[in-house]
């Protein structure tokens, strides 16, 4: 989901419905699960986006605009190939990525977060493969909006996700660390709430093709960033980020959005003395000038410069002027650090 949810596009009729919806939703707005940094109007807009048809209409409008503005995708991305496996990044909407993961021996494929079904279908036809599974990280329309159309085309296609999120066309609800397969490809799903109550990430076992593990992180983890805590506390998000950080350092990170340049610019503000980040930022800015994708990075790289994975680092604590209380639990303190970094990132975005 985009960081900015706007309702200014609504027609008069839709605006009237919106007002009625607001009145109905105010009583049951899930304030307890929204991040404390979110403003009241945003909470209302977010609830409308996730709980009513207005959200779907907003997604459809954004999809139409993106197709017109980026007829060939917002970025140029290259496929990653290793023995028996092909990972194809698919630039969709204004900054999203879907991913086509192919078992080259059987020509069976899975797609992660197919927000634009027409674009995904074009890639399926270009690669000459059959869609066997949709791996949905969470319910937001910019990640799940293409499920229905693709399921209509591929009736036997399985749709995976969490039962805690309202995933369109869900056929197989997954539990934490549950495994699934597509051809010879082996995946493991991890329950990572925080961005939404049912967010999940998927790890492709590199042994499927004698290559590195691949993390498809949705809106949990980005290059140098993380998703906003729409439906979870800082403690919940910290535990989910720790899950990602616990993966092998060589694991390739395939995020749900192209946010690298903005994230690294912010990282320079909160941790200005990080030389590893400086080098990565120069590389990213050069790539973005040419409209090239910055995916993937690795978990090992992210630990070096992503402030949301560095809540344990003293340098970051000092930069934020935060100190651990005398009897404060270590993870409680780290959650405070995460919350402060997230708050500063949200304010940085609004400048």
Image (tube, rainbow, N blue to C red):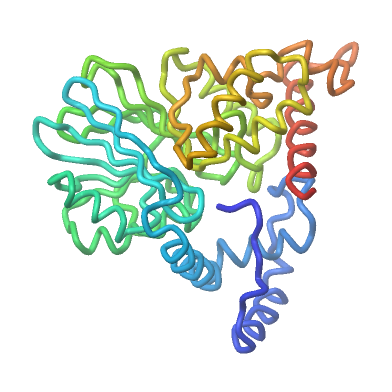
- x, y percent for residue 227: 60, 40
- The image shows residue 160, relative to residue 25, as above or below, that is above
Q: Nearer the viewer, residue 310 or 126?
A: 126
Q: Quadrant of residue 234?
A: top right
Using residue 258 as the reference point, say whether residue 40 is left or right of it. right
- The image shows residue 238, relative to residue 56, as above or below, that is above
Residue at (40% x, 35% y) in the render: 175
- x, y percent for residue 146: 35, 59
- x, y percent for residue 195: 59, 43
The residue positioned farthest toward the bottom in the image shown: 13
Residue at (64% x, 51% y) in the render: 3
- The image shows residue 184, relative to residue 132, as above or below, that is above
Using residue 131 as the reference point, say whether residue 14 is left or right of it. right
Q: Quadrant of residue 269?
A: top right
Residue at (32% x, 62% y) in the render: 148
Q: Nearer the viewer, residue 179 or 74?
A: 74
Residue at (26% x, 36% y) in the render: 101
- x, y percent for residue 93: 46, 56
Q: Quadrant of residue 22?
A: bottom right
């Amino acid at each position: 989901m985009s960081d900015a949810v706007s309702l200014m596009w609504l027609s008069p009729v839709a605006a009237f419905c919106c007002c009625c919806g607001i009145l109905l939703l105010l009583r049951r707005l899930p304030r307890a699960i929204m991040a404390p940094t979110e403003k009241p109007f945003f909470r209302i807009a977010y609830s409308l986006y996730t709980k009513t048809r207005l959200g779907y209409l907003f997604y459809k409008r954004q999809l139409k605009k993106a197709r017109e503005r980026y007829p060939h995708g917002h970025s140029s991305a290259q496929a990653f190939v290793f023995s028996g496996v092909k990972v194809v990044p698919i630039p969709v909407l204004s900054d999203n990525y879907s991913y086509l993961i192919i078992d080259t021996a059987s020509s069976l494929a899975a797609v992660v977060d197919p927000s634009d079904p027409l674009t995904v279908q074009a890639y399926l036809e270009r690669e000459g493969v059959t869609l066997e599974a949709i791996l949905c990280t969470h319910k937001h329309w910019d990640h799940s909006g293409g499920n229905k159309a693709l399921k209509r085309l591929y009736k036997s296609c399985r749709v995976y996700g969490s039962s805690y999120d309202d995933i369109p066309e869900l056929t197989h609800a997954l539990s934490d660390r549950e495994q699934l397969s597509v051809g010879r490809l082996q995946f493991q799903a991890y329950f990572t709430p925080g961005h939404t109550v049912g967010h999940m990430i998927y790890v492709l076992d590199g042994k499927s093709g004698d290559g590195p593990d691949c993390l498809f992180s949705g809106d949990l983890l980005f290059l140098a960033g993380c998703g906003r805590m729409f439906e979870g506390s800082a403690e919940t998000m910290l535990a989910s980020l720790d899950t990602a950080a616990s993966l092998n350092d060589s694991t390739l990170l395939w995020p749900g959005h192209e946010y690298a340049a903005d994230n690294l610019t912010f990282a320079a503000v909160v941790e200005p003395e990080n030389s590893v980040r400086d080098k990565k930022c120069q590389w990213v800015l050069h790539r973005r000038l040419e409209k090239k994708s910055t995916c993937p990075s690795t978990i090992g790289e992210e630990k070096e410069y992503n402030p949301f994975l560095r809540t344990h680092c003293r340098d970051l604590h000092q930069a934020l002027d935060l100190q651990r209380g005398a009897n404060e639990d270590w993870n409680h303190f780290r959650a405070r650090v995460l919350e402060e970094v997230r708050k500063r990132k949200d304010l940085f975005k609004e400048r």
